[in-house]
Image (cartoon, rainbow, N blue to C red):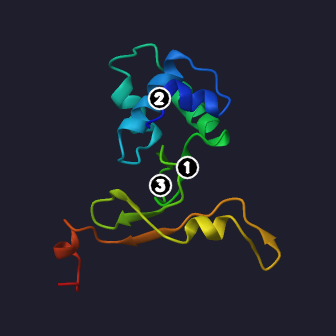
């Protein structure tokens, strides 16, 4: 059963507001791993009172409470993902798109103590060329 936007916010101790609901709804409906600026530009036309500061602060709160994941695979921008299940990410070096990659053992790695360390978060990033761009990659084809 899919979790509603308001339920997701409340499950993570976040009080729903018009802006928080709109941002979370956008993230839960778009699997493109958007940046804060992309989210702002998509939502501003329908919420003209929305500010970039509100978007950044809301994303920070959502990430701190575990409702979303911050992705730092892109050297220039932080991206955001509403899929909080353990999985890896792949970034295309040509087009810059970020894709989800299922990884079997990521959850088990994150759930264990490894050599005396307490793992609280595990992220795996892969970079290369996506299906559309692989023919444009130098020396690959």
Q: Earlier in the sequence, mark 3 or mark 2?
A: 2
Residue 2 coordinates in the image, percent (x, y): 43, 36
In front: label 1 or label 2: 2
User: Which residue is most to the top?
Assistant: 49
- Tell me which residue sits at (36%, 36%) in the image: 29
The quadrant in which residue 115 appears is: bottom right
46 in relation to 41, above or below:
above
Q: Quadrant of the N terminus?
A: top left
- Left or right: residue 34 compared with residue 72: left
Dot 2, crowdedness within 10 Å: few (<14), some or many (≥20)? Answer: few
Which element is circle 1 on? strand
Residue under label 2, please give it. 4
Question: Where's the C terminus, which quadrant?
Answer: bottom left
Residue at the spot of label 3: 76
Q: CA distance from mark 1 to mark 2?
A: 21 Å
Q: Could you give the CA–CA distance between mark 3 and mark 1, rounded to whole angstroms?
A: 13 Å
Q: Earlier in the sequence, mark 3 or mark 1?
A: 1
Q: Nearer the viewer, residue 37 or 121?
A: 121
The disc at residue 103 is none
Q: Could you tell me which residue is drawn at 50 percent across and 16 percent down?
A: 18
N-terminal of the pair, mark 1 or mark 2, is 2
Q: Position of residue 123 (x, y in %)?
A: 57, 63
Number of the front mark, 3 or 2 = 2
Horizontal side of residue 15 vs 88, given as left or right: right
Q: Disc 3 versus disc 2: distance between alpha carbons?
A: 31 Å
Rendering quarter of residue 95: bottom left
């Amino acid at each position: 059963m899919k979790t509603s936007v308001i339920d997701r916010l409340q499950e993570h101790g976040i009080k729903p507001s018009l802006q928080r609901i709109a941002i979370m709804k956008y993230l839960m409906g778009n699997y493109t791993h958007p940046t804060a600026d992309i989210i702002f530009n998509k939502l501003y036309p329908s919420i003209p009172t929305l500010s970039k500061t509100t978007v950044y602060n809301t994303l920070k709160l959502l990430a701190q409470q575990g409702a979303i994941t911050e992705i730092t695979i892109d050297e220039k921008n932080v991206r955001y993902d509403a899929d909080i299940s353990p999985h890896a990410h792949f970034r295309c070096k040509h087009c810059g798109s970020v894709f989800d990659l299922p990884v079997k053992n990521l959850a088990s790695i994150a759930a264990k103590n490894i050599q005396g360390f307490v793992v609280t978060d595990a992220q795996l990033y892969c970079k290369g060329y996506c299906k559309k761009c692989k023919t444009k990659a130098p020396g690959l084809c």
